[in-house]
Amino acid sequence: MSVLGQKCLKLPANRRVCGFTLLEVLVACTLLAVSIAALLGLFSRGVNGAELADRYARAAMLAESKLASVGVEEALSEGETSGQFDDDYAWRLSVRAYATATEPATPSTLETAALANAQASGTAAATTSATTLAPSAPLTTLGNIDVDALLFVRLYEVELSVAFRSDDGKERVVTLNTMKIGPRL
C-alpha cells in the first residue's frame, strides 16, 4: 500500500513503517544539486554581465569627462596623445583638422566681406598662395585669395577611446567622436 508516494512495510503485530528507499533519496538529492548548480550559474552570469555594464558605463563617463576638457582645460591641437585614468582605464585622444574631400567649403557672407577688405588693404594673408597650405586641407578660394588662410578658427575632429580589460581578459574599448571649433594654429 502506498501513501503519497511512500512505501509502507508491514511488520509483525500490525505495525507499519513508512518511508523512502535509499535510491529515491539519492535521486532526489542529485536532482536538487543539479538544479542548484544551474541556478548559481545563471546568477553568476547575471552578476558578471552587470559588472561589465558598470565598467562600460564608467569608461563612457571617463571618456565624456576627458572629451569635455579638450579645448577648455587643454589646448586643442592636432595630433595624438594618450594616458591613464587609473590602473584599469587608459585613454587615447586623436585630434585632426576636419577636411571634406567631396564637398568644397563655400565662403559665408562675413568671410566674403573679410576677403574683400583683405584684397583692398593688400594684407599678406590675402596674397598667400594655395600651394603653401597642406594638400590634405580643402581650399576655398575667392579669386586668388585663400579663404581658409583668413579664418581665425578651424573645425577639428576629436576622437577619444577609453580601453579597459574585463574579467574574462578581453580588452574592451569605448570610443566617442565629436567636432570642436578651435583656433587656427
Image (spheres, rainbow, N blue to C red):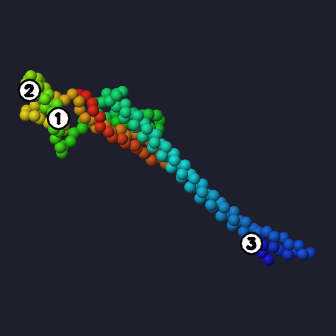
Q: Which residue is mark 1?
A: 108
The CA span between labels 3 and 2 is 104 Å
Task: For label 2, count other residues whose C-alpha is less than 10 Å away and answer few (under 14), some (14-19) or many (20+).
Answer: some
| Quarter-of-image position of residue 15 | bottom right
- At x 63%, y 58%, the residue is 36
Of the two numbered discs 2 and 1 on the same chain, state the one appearing first in sequence: 1
Left or right: where 107 falls relative to 120:
right
Q: Residue 110 or 149: which is nearer the viewer?
A: 110
Residue hosting label 2: 119
Badge 3 amino acid = Gly
Q: Amino acid at mark 2?
A: Gln
Q: Position of residue 77 (x, y in %)?
A: 28, 30
Give the CA separation, mark 2 to mark 1: 16 Å
Q: Secondary structure at mark 2?
A: helix
- Which secondary structure lies at badge 1? loop
Q: Which badge, 1 or 3, comes first in the chain's sequence?
A: 3
Which residue is at 63% across, 61% downward? 34
Observer-side mark, 2 or 1, equals 1
Quarter residue 65 falls in = top left
Mark 3 = which residue?
Answer: 5
* Tag 3 secondary structure: loop
Most foreground residue, 109 or 133: 109
Percent coordinates x, y for residue 66 in the rendering:
39, 34
- CB within 8 Å, label 1 to label 3: no
Q: Residue 57 shows which numbered tag?
A: none
How many neighbours does mark 3 have within 10 angstroms: few (below 14), some (14-19), or many (20 or more)? few
